Image (tube, rainbow, N blue to C red):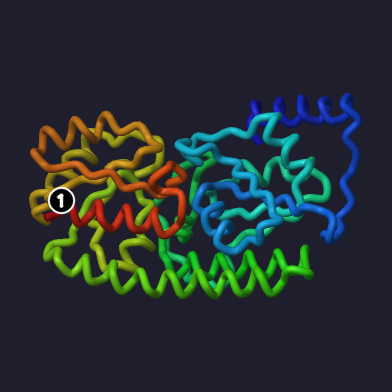
């Protein structure tokens, strides 16, 4: 645990003691209570919105527009979590900051939504707190995996709130049907593109590319938040020439000035893929995937 996090936990612990915060009992919801559920990243909030009943209050921890790779939990967020019943997490390095503080938020049930997911290997290996290890953690970007996440959320919610169990399960089924209907459209649109070889900003798009049969030949940042070396850029230039790459794809949550300069030098187009969404035009999960499919099509035409 790094020094800043130790200071944060200590300050929040003092805050709880001085404001009279006590342990929250673990109980199931009654008819008169409102279930408070937190999610670590925007896509989990989007999927939860599909599954939840109207009585649930959803708290999104990662602010819209922020990157989970650079985010730090604040005392205000920890105080909010103290009033929360469940938190849904991705795990595997994406939202490790939540695990470091859950232990001081008593009574909070944590559910990592990674069951029934076929994991890909990760190429992100470094020595900082955002190391993904051997697993690519961006599994929410496959619509099939989003459906699995929805059913896991429904299972967790029906335990906490058995009176509305049928609502959660039925909503998850409806979400699965909507994904199936949209997939017909997505696949038909992508068939228009002959060369689907692309280079992305960092190694976050494996599940998405597998689902849509898109070939990611490389990434601009070998590790999230670490600029590529001159040697790596030389190799990347050779890759662009070998695969006749037409476009590089940025991400709105990360600083991309260096990639923009590189794209100009290489005379290739730039697109903007969004792994998180949460903004006005990408508020639902289907909107998020729809945006990324259309971005690839429009950029590669």
Residue receiving disc 1: 239
Quadrant location, the C terminus: bottom left
Element under disc 1? helix
Viewer-side residue, 255 vs 295:
295
Name the one closer to the observer, 157 or 128: 157
Specify the quadrant that holds the N terminus. Answer: top right
Please give the count of numbered marks on the rendered protein. 1
At 38% from the left and 46% from the top, the residue drawn is: 281
- Above or below: residue 186 compared with residue 259: below
Instruction: Check the image and report above or below for 38 versus 70.
Output: below
Q: What residue lies at 23% left-to-right and 44% top-to-bottom?
A: 271
Residue shown at 63%/73% (left/top)?
Answer: 169
Name the residue rendered at 35%, 55% in the picture. 205
Q: Is residue 33 rendered to the left or right of residue 185?
A: right
Examine the image and state in which quarter residue 49 appears: bottom right
Give x and y (percent) for residue 269: 14, 42
| Whole-percent x, y for residue 73 in the image | 63, 34
Quick check: 249 above or below 190?
A: above
The percent coordinates of residue 293 (x first, y second) are: 28, 58
Q: Nearer the viewer, residue 39 or 58?
A: 58
x and y percentages locating residue 152 in the rendered image: 62, 68
Q: Is residue 221 toward the left or the right of residue 161 in the image?
A: left
Q: Nearer the viewer, residue 150 or 1?
A: 150
């Amino acid at each position: 645990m790094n020094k800043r996090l130790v200071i944060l936990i200590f300050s929040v612990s003092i805050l709880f003691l001085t404001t009279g915060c006590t342990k929250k009992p673990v109980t199931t919801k009654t008819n008169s209570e409102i279930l408070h559920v937190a999610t670590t990243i925007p896509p989990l909030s989007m999927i939860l919105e599909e599954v939840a009943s109207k009585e649930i209050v959803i708290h999104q921890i990662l602010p819209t527009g922020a990157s989970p790779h650079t985010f730090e939990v604040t005392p205000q967020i920890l105080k909010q979590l103290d009033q929360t019943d469940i938190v849904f997490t991705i795990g595997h390095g994406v939202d490790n900051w939540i695990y470091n503080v859950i232990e001081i938020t008593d009574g909070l049930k944590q559910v990592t939504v990674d069951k029934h997911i076929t994991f890909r290997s990760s190429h992100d290996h470094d020595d900082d707190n955002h190391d993904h290890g051997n697993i690519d953690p961006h599994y929410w970007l496959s619509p099939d995996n989003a459906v699995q996440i929805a059913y896991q959320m429904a299972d967790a919610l029906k335990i906490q709130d058995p009176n509305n169990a049928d609502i959660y399960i039925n909503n998850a089924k409806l979400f699965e049907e909507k994904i199936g209907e949209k997939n017909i459209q997505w696949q038909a649109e992508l068939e228009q593109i002959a060369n689907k070889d692309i280079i992305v900003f960092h190694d976050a798009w494996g599940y998405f590319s597998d689902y849509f049969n898109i070939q990611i030949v490389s990434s601009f940042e070998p590790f999230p938040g670490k600029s590529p070396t001159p040697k790596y850029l030389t190799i990347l230039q050779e890759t662009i020439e070998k695969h006749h790459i037409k476009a590089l794809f940025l991400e709105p949550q990360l600083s991309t000035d260096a990639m923009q300069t590189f794209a100009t030098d290489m005379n290739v187009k730039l697109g903007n893929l969004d792994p998180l969404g949460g903004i006005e035009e990408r508020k639902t999960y289907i909107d998020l995937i729809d945006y990324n499919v259309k971005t690839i099509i429009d950029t590669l035409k």
